[in-house]
Image (cartoon, helix red, strand yellow):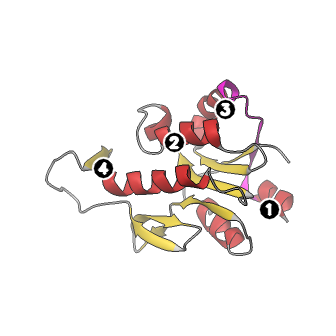
């Protein structure tokens, strides 16, 4: 199996739901999913089945604890918590799969969000661990270039293709 699987598809096409359902059938898996719960994007720690908020209230007081992306306001503290989860997983010798949902313009253009965690994972994750990254279609070229810098082989899949691969 390839070292890095890139899962891509249209917004709201079921990528996160597919991964959450698939994760429920697996062992030795860790990572972060970003489902929408009650119209709000959340972080979901796969290993401990824990949800916590990604978004903060609309129009929060401006301070350094808020990450503004377009019309969205995200908690930098919870992004850091999710990033730590990803980095800590690199030390787990029993790990078979690590999932990062998702890498987009925030990471690849602005070097925020999961960017530093992604670099850490690419540097430290054992090559025997299958890394699955959800990537926006408009960022495929950028993520492939980054993976090439770290000598990580990769393959790009739609949900339908990945269902067959992981079956």
Rendered image quadrant of residue 163:
bottom right
User: Where is mark 2, residue-wise?
Assistant: 104
- Look at 51% across and 43% down and name the residue there: 117
Rendered image quadrant of residue 149:
top right
In the rendered picture of this protein, how many numbered marks are placed on residues? Answer: 4
Q: Secondary structure at mark 1?
A: helix
Which numbered mark, 4 or 1, is in the foreground of this view? 1
Dot 4, how many residues are within 10 Å of its Cα: few (below 14), some (14-19), or many (20+)?
Answer: few
Which numbered mark, 4 or 3, is in the foreground of this view? 3
Looking at the picture, tell me which residue is in the foreground, 33 or 47.
Answer: 47
User: Can residue 156 be seen in this snapshot?
Assistant: yes
Q: Is residue 158 magenta?
A: yes
- Look at 64% across and 48% down and name the residue there: 133
Q: Which residues are magenta?
A: 147-159
Q: Earlier in the sequence, mark 1 or mark 2?
A: 2
Q: Residue 71 got which mark?
A: 4
Dot 3, how many residues are within 10 Å of its Cα: few (below 14), some (14-19), or many (20+)?
Answer: some
Q: Earlier in the sequence, mark 4 or mark 3?
A: 4
Q: Earlier in the sequence, mark 2 or mark 3?
A: 2
User: Where is mark 1, residue-wise?
Assistant: 163
Residue 31 drawn at (x, y percent): 59, 58
Which numbered mark, 4 or 2, is in the foreground of this view? 2
Label 4, label 1: how far apart the Cα atoms are:
33 Å
- Look at 76% across and 42% down and name the residue there: 127
Label 4, label 2: how far apart the Cα atoms are:
16 Å
Q: Residue 147 got which mark?
A: 3
Rendered image quadrant of residue 70:
top left
């Amino acid at each position: 199996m390839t070292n890095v699987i890139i899962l891509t598809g249209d917004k709201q096409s079921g990528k996160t739901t597919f991964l959450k359902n698939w994760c429920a059938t697996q062992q030795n898996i860790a990572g972060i999913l970003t489902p929408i719960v009650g119209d709000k994007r959340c972080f979901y720690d796969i290993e401990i089945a824990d949800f916590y908020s990604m978004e903060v209230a609309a129009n929060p007081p401006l301070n350094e604890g808020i990450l503004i992306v377009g019309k969205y306001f995200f908690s930098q503290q919870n992004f850091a918590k999710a990033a730590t989860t990803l980095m800590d997983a690199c030390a787990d010798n029993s790990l078979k799969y690590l999932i990062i949902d998702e890498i987009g313009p925030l990471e690849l253009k602005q070097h925020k969000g999961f960017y530093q965690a992604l670099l850490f994972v690419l540097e430290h994750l054992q090559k025997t661990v299958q890394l699955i990254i959800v990537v926006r279609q408009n960022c495929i070229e950028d993520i492939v270039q980054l993976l090439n810098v770290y000598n990580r082989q990769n393959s790009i899949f739609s949900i339908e293709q990945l269902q067959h691969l992981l079956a």
